[in-house]
Amino acid sequence: MEMKTAFLPAFIQSYFIALGVLVGGAFIGGFGAFLSGEPPLTMMYRFASSLKIWALIAAIGGTFDTFYSVERGFFQGETRDVIKQFLLILSATGGAQTGMTFIRWFTQEHSV
């Protein structure tokens, strides 16, 4: 049985889960690259780029519950659920983008 959390805590958690998945995965992957003799900073940037979508999936729960809520919103007239899910996805996207910015600053890849 799944416990429902209030919207604001879920919104904040979604942001930080995406941020943590992206930054943590990039740093651990960079350490692995270092151990295997590859350039760690370049690999960190590459890992972060490929982890971005997975950070979003992890942050929104990785299940079809999000899609079910959107379906229910469209077909059963519960637009409040659609808006909540959209905002949770937006929060996760912001967390992943913030993580990507941190990695870009740290690695100095693609600096303008």
Image (spheres, rainbow, N blue to C red):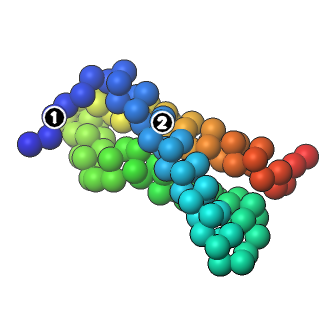
Vertical relation: 46 (above or below) 103? below
Q: Looking at the image, can residue 89 be seen?
A: no
- Give the residue at mark 1: 3
Name above or below for residue 109 compared with residue 80.
below
Question: Which labelled disc corresponds to residue 39?
Answer: none
Which residue is located at x 29 percent, y 31 percent?
81
The percent position of residue 3, horizontal first and vertical second, equals 16, 34
Image location (x, y in percent) of residue 70:
30, 41
Q: Is residue 83 left or right of residue 76?
A: right
Residue 19 appears in the rendering: yes
Q: List x then y, in percent, for residue 55.
A: 48, 51
Q: Residue at x 40, y 50 (%)?
A: 58
Q: Which residue is mark 2?
A: 16
Q: Outermost residue toward the left?
A: 1
Q: Amino acid at mark 2?
A: Phe
Characterize the local packing of mark 2: few (<14), some (14-19) or many (20 or more) Cα atoms within 10 angstroms.
many
Regarding mark 2 in the picture, which secondary structure is present there?
helix
- Side (left or right) of 56 relative to 100: left
The quarter holding residue 25 reads: bottom right
Callout 1: 10 Å neighbours few (<14), some, many (20+)?
few
Q: Amino acid at mark 1?
A: Met
Quadrant position of the N terminus in the picture: top left
Tell me if label 2 and label 1 are in contact, CB under 8 Å: no
- Image coordinates of residue 56 in percent, x first then y, are 47, 49
Q: Quadrant of residue 84?
A: top left
- Left/right placement of residue 25 relative to residue 10 reads right
